[in-house]
Amino acid sequence: MSKIKSPTNDKDYSKLLYKSIKLYSETTKLPLEKMIEIFNEETTKIINKKIDPDAVILFEVDEKKEMVNSYNANCLVVEDEEFENLDDASFALFNISLTDAKKNNKNVQVGDWVKTKINLNVLAEDPEHKNVLKIILQSLIHGIKTFQKTVIFEKYSKLIGEKIWVECTSKNNDGSWNVKVKDDNATAHLPHQMISKNRDIQPGQRLEVVIEDVKETSKLSQIRVSLDSPKMVEKELMENIPEIAEGLIEIVKIYRSPGERTKVAVRKTNKSEAAFDLQGAIIGAQGERIKKVSEKLNNERIDIIEYSSDIKQYIINAMSPGKIVDVVAKKNDDKNKHYYVIVEDDNAKLTVAIGSKGINVKLASNLTETFLDVKSTKAADELGLIYDKSNIGKLDAKVEKVVERKLPKRKSRPFETTHVTMASFDNDVAAFELEEQETLNMNSDWDFEELFTKYNEKISEINKVEDNDQELKEELVKETKQDIEDYKKAKKVVIEDFKVDSDLANFGLDGDIDLSEFDDEDWN
């Protein structure tokens, strides 16, 4: 009886198999036991399909000897003569001679099924089945990837909404990024819509992202992450404002334009007391809390909006920092989703309410889930809208009071006892806008050099105040200069953005704003 010789001896084959499976295990970070299970399933599947439907291939690990032995648990016992002058190299994988079978079990008979040690490399010598090893390898890789996807889904689907660190690996043509999860071989996809246009991402850069969703199966990355989504804002608020984490404040909704502005609707919960200061808790002393959140979000502007069950009041709140005269529901709207938002007939106030390229009204509309149509009081009157006119002019009175505040004389820490709220912050902004508008009305031929001179005089007056706190003085000077620069940009927006008919028409303002009083040279 002639014996079939393997391409390598059994010992070398078993050691090589151990090294291969061990390497797969380490590379994929999958347990060795699971790798063996995958090898068993995938190899048996291909052998059953291509050669022997009764075969059950098993791989068994011997850690001490660093060997993996392979077996066929369903090997058929045949007469010794069937092995004589045999040309089929793969025959020994599925059959065993009676003589060899009796070495392990004296009671075995022809036709019995026994577990037999095999060497799959003999398939390489079989012309009919020489490609089976390649097919097995492909199936193994597929099986490993399938299991990896299961592991990723089970692990990361529980972390949706959580922050993780990733490394940027490559940028795609559509502006999205492929990223790799830190300390893990898992890959993730960062869509371009989830990236602020102000960010400059480079390969190898590490970023903190939020897991948006995880797919159970996918040809590409299963994990989708975001860098600038509302969930990132929510996580930062949760981490930096204890009252939110403790359940005293509820985040109702967040709507974001990454890199530009975010509006967050909040409300007190039943856990908070009646006197609980919602606004103060979020903004923090000297605005430190909200400032910290903004810094983590690449200095993005964050508007904290107090939620109201009264939809009109909610819209008024959401339109902040715009000052709204009234909100009027449109007629023939059964779903109560369309509203006129009425603003005083003043270019500066309309600009603030609408926002650069309509960003403020767009965010407010999405936050309140309504369709908002901004109208000046003049346009509202022409349309015959009935609205509450009692608020007209009230803002001016409040602003004048704010403008006349005197600088405190003190040597202690600046703003130590200042109570910062969203309302007071908005009033400060409005005060500056009103004062600047009045200046424009009285001195329409001034250019910015003269404006700077005017404000430099104010800075000098601040320096003359009997206050030895140099740090406070420097801060006030810095803020005043910044206000001028910011408002200069705001006025530039009026010229560049709102001359476009389509922008104005979107908000029902085409023809309402008269820009003729502004000459280009006055804005340079």
Image (cartoon, rainbow, N blue to C red):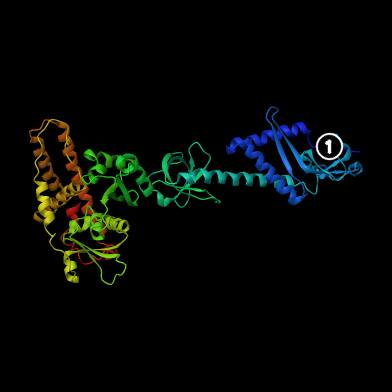
Q: Which residue is mark 1?
A: 5
**Can you say which quadrant of the picture contains the N terminus?**
top right
Secondary structure of residue under mark 1: loop
Along the line of sight, the residue nearer the viewer: 167 or 487: 167
Looking at the image, residue 15 sits to the left or right of residue 498; the answer is right
Looking at the image, residue 32 sits to the left or right of residue 55; the answer is left
Tell me where residue 339 appears, x and y as whole percent: 26, 65
Identify the residue at horizontal 27%, vertical 66% (top origin): 505
Amino acid at pointer 1? Lys
Q: Quadrant of residue 459?
A: top left
Residues packed near mark 1 inside 10 Å, few (<14), some (14 to 19) or many (20 plus): few
Identify the residue at horizontal 10%, vertical 42% (top origin): 458
Q: Quadrant of residue 470?
A: top left
Tell me where residue 267 appears, x and y as whole percent: 28, 50
Looking at the image, residue 268 sits to the left or right of residue 206; the answer is left
In the rendered image, is residue 75 in sight?
Answer: yes
Q: Above or below — where is 72 with respect to 263?
A: above
In the rendered image, is residue 196 in sight?
Answer: no
Tell me where residue 179 appears, x and y as whole percent: 48, 43
Give the residue furthest to the top: 64
Along the line of sight, the residue nearer the viewer: 244 or 49: 244
Tell me where residue 209 appears, x and y as whole percent: 42, 43
Identify the residue at horizontal 38%, vertical 47% (top origin): 231
Q: How many marks?
A: 1
Along the line of sight, the residue nearer the viewer: 161 or 180: 161
Along the line of sight, the residue nearer the viewer: 451 or 128: 128
